[in-house]
């Protein structure tokens, strides 16, 4: 049997390797690990996390005026108040008067915390992404820096779910998008954190009759930029079908392809994490480098409540991430 395999031409061996990889990946998907244990204030939606200079952790998530939580050890979490305790009236034209602000993206750069966040209403693309900054990250310390990008009902994409990435040349970029024509990217001014120019890059979209893609998150590892996205239905409690997909590119602006080589702009994406057992609809992911890469996300329990999920990421011999 070994001799017969060795006699197969190289292209056939490559196809065989692909089949074996597919089998292995399918087996891996059937055995996703449960989230690591977390305690305390763990009911979150759309989490984003940074490790602070003192070594503790700051988390922001969807809620009234953006909700903050902190942890000393990444396991036990406590409430830390809203980012904007006096409200964010500049967002109300997009929220229908609601205080609920969505999908914050939290980062710490150059001695400041940057908070990109969304203002919209469910199912609408009359939406906007705003930026706030703080030197401490504490509730009430955030200063509104203004509008980054907005969309209207005549737009072909949706300005929610922001994620900041800084490339190897120090250039700032914001990926974002939900449904419609999928995931987009715009350049930012590194000095202000606001939009620079009018360019819009197309990163990923669904195919086959669905537009259900959102929540981009981009990180550079080795020679590749990895684009994580969420597919399918969020926000339906235990009936949610959210799942985390990934592709990669050698350029921050793409093109991103999945493990099979399919372009993410043509519906490509390799599944990283999906529902299993009592873990329903894991998604709206973020990656934190902290003694190795960690995947943060929310998931729904059998009771329909959204909770914080954390798992470690590892990388296979081909450089593709998997949940461990």
Image (tube, rainbow, N blue to C red):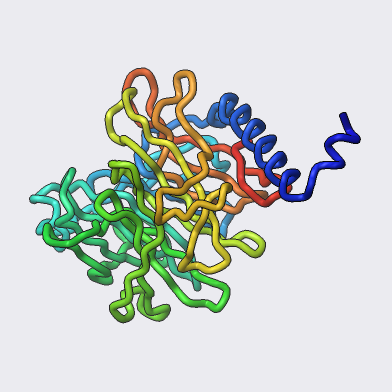
Q: Residue at x 45, y 45 (%)?
A: 285
Looking at the rendered image, the quarter that the C terminus falls into is top right
297 vs 90, nearest the viewer: 297
Quadrant position of residue 323: top right
205 relative to 275, above or below: below
The x, y position of residue 37, in whole percent, is 55, 29
Left-right relation of 102 to 276: left
Q: Percent from the top left, x then y, of residue 43?
A: 37, 33
Above or below, 156 against 74 in this view is below
Quadrant where the N terminus sits is: top right
Q: Which residue occupies 43% across, 50% down?
A: 48
Q: Position of residue 190 (x, y in %)?
A: 42, 78
Q: Splitting the image into 4 quarters, where does residue 177 fall?
A: bottom left
Q: Is residue 142 above or below residue 48?
A: below
Q: Residue at x 37, y 75 (%)?
A: 188
Furthest residue to the right? 3
């Amino acid at each position: 049997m070994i001799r017969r395999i060795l006699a197969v031409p190289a292209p056939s061996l490559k196809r065989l390797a692909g089949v074996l990889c597919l089998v292995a990946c399918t087996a891996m998907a059937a055995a996703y690990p449960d989230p690591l244990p977390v305690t305390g204030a763990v009911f979150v939606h759309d989490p984003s996390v940074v490790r602070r200079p003192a070594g503790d952790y700051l988390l922001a998530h969807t809620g009234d005026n953006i909700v903050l939580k902190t942890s000393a050890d990444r396991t036990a979490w406590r409430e830390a108040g809203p980012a904007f305790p006096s409200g964010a009236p500049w967002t109300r034209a997009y929220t229908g008067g609601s205080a609920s602000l969505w999908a914050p993206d939290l980062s710490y750069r150059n001695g400041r915390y940057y908070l990109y966040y969304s203002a919209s209403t469910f199912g609408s693309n009359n939406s906007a992404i705003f930026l706030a900054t703080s030197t401490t990250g504490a509730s009430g310390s955030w200063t509104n820096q203004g509008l980054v990008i907005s969309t209207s009902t005549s737009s072909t994409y949706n300005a929610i779910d922001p994620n900041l990435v800084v490339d190897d040349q120090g250039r700032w970029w914001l990926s974002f998008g939900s449904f419609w024509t999928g995931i987009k990217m715009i350049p930012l001014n590194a000095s202000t954190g606001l939009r620079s120019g009018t360019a819009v890059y197309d990163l990923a979209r669904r195919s086959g009759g669905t537009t259900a893609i959102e929540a981009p998150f981009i990180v550079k590892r080795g020679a590749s930029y990895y684009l994580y996205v969420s597919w399918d239905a969020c926000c339906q409690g235990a009936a949610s079908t959210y799942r985390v997909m990934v592709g990669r590119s050698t350029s921050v602006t793409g093109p991103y392809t999945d493990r099979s080589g399919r372009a993410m702009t043509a519906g490509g994406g390799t599944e990283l994490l999906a529902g299993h057992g009592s873990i329903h609809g894991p998604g709206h992911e973020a990656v934190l480098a902290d003694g190795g890469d960690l995947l943060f996300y929310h998931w729904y329990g059998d009771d329909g409540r959204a909770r914080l999920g954390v798992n470690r990421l590892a990388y296979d011999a081909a450089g593709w991430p998997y949940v461990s």
